[in-house]
Image (spheres, rainbow, N blue to C red):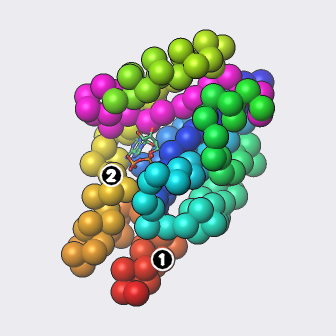
């Protein structure tokens, strides 16, 4: 049974992220969604908010687990007996960035494999940063994120 990690900021989770999780859980035995906590990065949602959102959105899937990580993802993988890092690809720009990252991670630990999964066509424009911007400008994000995320996003932006 192969355990795959799906690492990311998920600030906030989108239908694009959920699409990757839903499809990959049918391929791998276990999926660990790993929420990155990087002190150098500014997030709109706190660690616990991102954890709670992702937990609620994935609790219907028994082989999907959610956790946070403050260390190198390859170290986290080793500790949790995961051999795959799963990454979603929306376009060539993503591929270029993700390819470089996969080379870096391979250099850190050659036993951990990166696997790319292309997005399904209806999700290829979904990007957390653009969705935050759109929400801030009062745009309709209802088709981009689940209701619980849209509600929290609105509350956050009114503050
Ligand atoms: P982003 O701000 O790009 O959404 P994340 O760090 O939260 O960034 O993304 C985590 C992973 O999910 C990355 O592998 C990213 O490429 C992937 N991802 C993000 N949005 C989508 C999408 N719409 N379709 C497929 N994969 C996606």
Q: Quadrant of residue 78?
A: top right
Q: Is residue 35 left or right of residue 126?
A: right
Residue 9, above or below 150: above
Q: Nearer the viewer, residue 146 or 83?
A: 83
Q: Nearer the viewer, residue 57 or 50?
A: 50
For the view shown, which residue lies furthest in the bottom direction? 159
For mark 1, give the secondary structure: helix
Residue shown at the point (36%, 86%) measured from the top left: 158
- What distance separates the C-alpha of mark 2 from that of mark 1? 18 Å
Q: Quadrant of residue 140?
A: bottom left
For mark 2, give the secondary structure: loop
Q: Nearer the viewer, residue 73 or 129?
A: 73
Query: Residue 152 bears which disc, if any?
Result: 1
Q: Position of residue 127 (x, y in %)?
A: 33, 52
What's drawn in magenta, residue-wise? Answer: 80-96
User: Upstream in the sequence, badge 2 or badge 1?
Assistant: 2
Residue 146, above or below 121: below
For the view shown, which residue lies furthest in the front direction? 40
Query: Residue 1 bears which disc, if any?
Result: none
Residue 60, above or below 85: below
Residue 30, above or below 157: above
Query: Residue 126 bears which disc, if any?
Result: 2
Residue shown at the point (69%, 51%) measured from the top left: 67
Q: Is mark 2 within 8 Å of ligand 1?
A: yes
Q: Can residue 124 be found in the magenta stretch?
A: no
Asked whether residue 24 appears in the rendered view, the answer is yes
């Amino acid at each position: 049974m192969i355990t795959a990690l799906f690492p990311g900021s998920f600030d906030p989770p989108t239908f694009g992220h959920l699409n990757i999780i839903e499809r990959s859980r049918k391929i791998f035995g276990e999926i660990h969604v790993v929420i990155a906590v990087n002190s150098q990065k500014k997030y709109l949602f706190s660690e616990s908010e991102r954890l709670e959102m992702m937990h609620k959105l994935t609790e219907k899937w028994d082989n999907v687990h959610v956790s946070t990580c403050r260390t190198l993802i390859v170290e986290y993988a080793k500790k949790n007996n995961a051999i795959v890092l799963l990454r979603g690809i929306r376009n060539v720009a993503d591929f270029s960035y993700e390819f470089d990252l996969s080379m870096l991670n391979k250099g850190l630990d050659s036993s951990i494999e990166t696997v790319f999964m292309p997005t399904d066509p209806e999700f290829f424009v979904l990007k957390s940063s653009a969705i935050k911007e759109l929400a801030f400008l009062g745009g309709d994000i209802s088709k981009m994120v689940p209701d619980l995320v849209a509600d929290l996003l609105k509350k956050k932006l009114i503050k």
